[in-house]
Image (tube, rainbow, N blue to C red):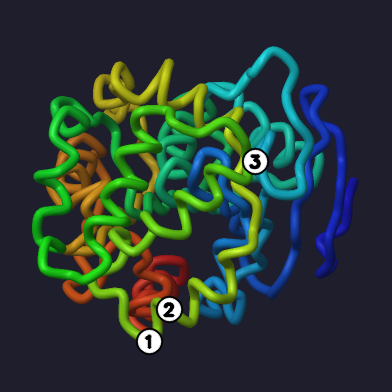
Amino acid sequence: MAQLRPGEYDTVLNDVRIHYTVQGSGPVMIAHSGGPGMDARDWDDFARIDDFVTLVAIHPRGSGLSGPAAGDAYLLPDYASDVEALRIHLGLERPILMGWSHGGMVAQQYAFTYPDSLSKLILYDTSAHFGEFLSDIEAAVREFKNEPWFERSFEALKAEWDGKYESDDDMARLWADEMKFYFKKFDARAETYHERTRDLPVRIAPLKTFNDNEAASMDLRLHLHKITVPTLVIVGRHDFITNVAMAEEIARHIPSARLEIFEESGHFVHVEESEEFYRIVKEFVEG
């Protein structure tokens, strides 16, 4: 059994080399980052919640410091299976699971697929279903129309959704522009975070699999009633990509869910309202 000592680790799970980081102390929380294809180091300092939890940050298959999956096996059940394999590898009985963005979709999949394997669930700026949202991405970012960077960032956003990228480097350049939409306001705090994380790699194989094969048809809502563990649903009021309506829908379908809306945030609550994020998560973990 692996010991939960702070550090960087590699192991092979489901025939994929998986990297994970351990930090902090307290109840164990597995943290699954967003994307797909984004680097787990986007969590940055986790708003310092490692003060009260032992964080196990998994680098999802095909992303960050983990290896690629054969056959482009990058669907939600594949990621959920890796979380379960990591739990077993670490000898954890019922850890807390937190999933952010695409990681929140993985966390939903995990919670109803492996209902006895977790104690609490945090779904952070995520969705169970996109519906017609993807057909009108311009409407979703309309509130940013007057920003001086709007046109360039919108072109980058459209290029991603139209699949107009050929390499990881192409997508990293697009992300550097389009990520401005993911904050309530791209202010000094957001820009500082961007500078810290902008050179992290973006992997297109997992991203293309999701965008081409899963995003439009994904619908986890029919299974959410099976999630019976205490669940915290977090959303930023100004999150354009996984919006408040999506969070409210998740909370309605999970019997024991509690919804927290952060009024001054977009998709990066742990950056924009880090102190309040810390407080709410601590209250949920310890409550």
Horizontal and vertical percent position of residue 242: 26, 47
Indicate the quadrant containing the C terminus: top left, top right, bottom left or bottom right.
bottom left
Residue that badge 1 annotates:
188
Q: Which mark is residue 60?
A: 3
- The residue lying toward the viewer, choosing from 192 and 272, is 192
Residue that badge 2 annotates:
191
Q: Is residue 273 above or below residue 110?
A: below
Mark 1 or mark 3: whose residue is earlier in sequence = 3
Mark 2 and mark 1 in contact? Answer it, CB < 8 Å.
yes
Mark 3 or mark 2: whose residue is earlier in sequence = 3
Q: Nearer the viewer, mark 1 or mark 3?
A: 1
Q: In this view, does 80 lie above or below 33?
A: above
In the rendered image, is residue 91 in sight? no
Q: Is residue 120 above or below residue 176?
A: above
Task: State left or right for residue 97 relative to residue 15.
Answer: left
Label 2 crowd (10 A; few <14 / some 14-19 / many >=20): some
Q: Nearer the viewer, mark 3 or mark 2?
A: 2
Q: Which mark is residue 236?
A: none
Q: Which amino acid does label 2 sit on?
A: Glu
Label 1 crowd (10 A; few <14 / some 14-19 / many >=20): few
Task: State left or right for residue 211 relative to residue 168.
Answer: left
Task: State left or right for residue 252 relative to residue 122.
Answer: left
- The residue lying toward the viewer, choosing from 250 and 177, is 177
Q: Which amino acid does label 1 sit on?
A: Ala
